[in-house]
Every structure is written in C-alpha cells, then in structure tokens.
Amino acid sequence: MKILNLIQCANLGGMEQVSLRLMRGLQARGHELRLLCLNPIGGLGPLLQASGIPFEGLPYAGRGGWRILPSLRRKFHEYPADAMIMTGHHLLAMPTMGNFAKGHRILAIHFHHAGEKPEWQWRLIYRVACSRFQAITFPADFIRQEAERIYPPVAALAHTVRNPLFMPALPTAEQKKAARRTLGLPMDGPIIGNAGWLIPRKRFDVFLQTAALILARCPEAHFVIAGNGGERVRLQALAARLNLTGRLTWTGWVQNMETFYHSLDVLLFNSDWDALPTTPLEAMSHGVPVVASVLNGGLKEIISAPDWGFLLNRHEPETLAEAVVHLLQNPAAAARISKAGRERIRLTSDPETIALEHEKMWQR
C-alpha cells in the first residue's frame, strides 16, 4: 500500500521517533511511505532521508494553523494514497481530508489529556475524529481510558498499540568507551543519565535532587542530561546549589541517541505526566537498567514488575537514590534487570508486529 503519514512536527521528540520506527516497520512489510508535516521539517529530516522516506513540511501559519489548510488540501490531491495515519491530532486538518484515503484512516494519539487541553476541547476533537477515522490508537491503556472517559463513543474505535522499538545489539566494552569519549564523559566510574525536553512536567529537578544523594554515597558517579528546553537555566542554577556542577554534563540534543545509551550504567527517569515515555523504553532496549518515578502515565504497563526495572508512582529522591546505588553496587542484579528489560521490550514493542496491527485495522 501507499501510506501517507500526516504529522504535526518533525523534530527529534519521542512522538516523532516513534512515528519513524512505525514507518520503518511498515516499510519492512513492503509498504510505500511518505511523510507530510504541518510544520517545517526539523531534526527528523536526516533520519527520514536515511530511511528512504520522502517528506515535505508546510509553513505553519494562522491561529490553529488555518492558513495552511489550502496547501494541505492541494497536497492530498498530489499524494494519492491507499491509507493514512494522522500522527497527533489536528482539529482543523481533519475536515480537510475530504475523500483522501477514505475508509483507511488511523489517528494516532501520543499525548496524555489532563493538563494539556480542557475537556470540552478534547470532546470536540474526538467527536470530529470519530466521524473521520476508522481507528484511533493509543500507546497505553492509561491514555486510551482517559479518552474513553472524556468522550465515550471513542471506545468503539480505540486500540492500545504499543510504541515500536527496534532491538539494538548490546554495546561492546570498546563501544561504551567510545560513546563516553564522544559525549565528553569520564572513562571511569558509573554514569547515570536522563534525556528529554527540559520542561516542568519532565521533573529534571527530581533527577538533580536524586543525583546529589547518589553522589554522597558514590563519589565516583557522574551524571549526564541529554536534551534542551526552557527550564535549562533554572535547572543549571539548581545543579550549582546542589554542588553538582563538576559532576554533571549537559549535552544538549544528541542526534544519535545510541551513543547516549551506550554511555550509561543506569537511566534515572522522572515525570509528572507521560503517555508512554520513550526514553526509559529505549534505555531498556539497550540493556540499561531503569530507575523511574512517574506520577501519571503508561510506563507502569511496561515496568509492571520489579524484574524489569524500578518504578515509583511518586517522587521520592531518597528512595530513587537507594535503588540506583543498589544497582551500582550489585552488578549481578543490574545484569538480571538489563536482560529481563530487553526481553520485555522485545515482546511488547516489536515493530513488525505493530505494523501488522495497523494493517489489520486498515483491512477492517
């Protein structure tokens, strides 16, 4: 089939990375993919090009993007397709589709609902979506159930479809050293890190508070944060107050996240809200043990037992620090969690299986 993926943004965020992996999974099953972005193409462009996926970005303009609608309508005529995925909701773009890929449309929701928009807006979005799409996918039961509570008719179209992840090879000792050299990290001592947007709900302040407690018990530890955002200045000031400045590396955005994961001994992840966070799942796929605290989100559906990682439903830096130190001081326990975590991701996130689920939805 020829499949068009209509996406809101093409940066290097979790949603975009997940969408790319889905497209690659569909490619592996013989489908032809094209990406159309409602905004100018960002950092995802080189990865799309490397995957052989044609792409184009539109100049987003007007409140809610209404000025791009004529261009979008023309693109639908220019791109004949058998099926489509709308990655991320866009209320104004939904009526613009007309008969494009009619009967074979999937809306992929990657966001949690509470705190993002008022419920009346979500009800409007889902009311329109239910008349335009044949299926609506959610990466976690958590956000699917949120949607069904807000607008019950969604339940008839809703599917929980996990985010795909390709299983990488485990790094050799030399590859781990090379990764640390690339990121400017110490060659000796354990490395604890996290990655993502530096925004309030991602709670990098909890990461820093936990890091200070870890450092008091493991003076040889070093910490790394990959990503950027509006909270960076405030977080750097907090790091200075916690005496972390010489033991913490800020890398900014990392193009090749494999390098980041290869450098780590433990991933320490914290968030107030996350539909299904990409960073801990990617870490597990690379064999990195995960210690996390998430107040609201779907991570508990993947790390649902201590065999696969350590997960709290509250932010307790002392407890998190104890879990990290335990892994650092018990290599055998860390190795068991590393192996079990990879197997968990292999079973829940196989790209070809997830591509097949999409095929079945289009066929229905």
Image (tube, rainbow, N blue to C red):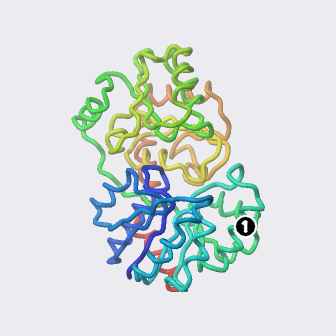
Residue at 65% across, 41% down: 272
Q: Which residue is mark 1?
A: 148
When the figure is inspected, residue 220 is found, relative to residue 62, above or below; the finding is above
Residue at 49% across, 45% down: 280
The quadrant where residue 335 appears: top left
Residue 349 in view here: no
**Label 1 CA crowd tier, 10 Å (few <14, some 14–19, many 20+):** some
Task: Kindly give the residue lying farthest to the left in the view shown.
Answer: 174
Question: Looking at this view, is 111 or 339 the one in front?
Answer: 111
Residue 46 in view here: yes
The quadrant where residue 345 appears: bottom left
Residue at 48% across, 51% down: 14
When the figure is inspected, residue 203 is found, relative to residue 222, above or below; the finding is below
The quadrant where residue 124 appears: bottom right
When the figure is inspected, residue 164 is found, relative to residue 361, above or below; the finding is above
Residue 26 % position (x, y) = 38, 72
Question: Looking at this view, is 92 or 49 the one in front?
Answer: 92
Q: Judge from the rendering whether residue 151 lies leftward or rightward of residue 201; answer left or right.
A: right
Residue 261 % position (x, y) = 37, 40
Q: Judge from the rendering whether residue 221 lies leftward or rightward of residue 30; answer left or right.
A: right
Which quarter of the rendering shows the N terminus? bottom left
Residue 103 % position (x, y) = 55, 86
Which quarter of the rendering shows the C terminus? bottom right
Residue 186 % position (x, y) = 32, 23
Residue at 50% across, 29% down: 324
When the figure is inspected, residue 336 is found, relative to residue 156, above or below; the finding is above
Q: Amino acid at mark 1?
A: Glu
Q: Please tell me whether mark 1 sits on a helix, a strand or a loop.
A: helix
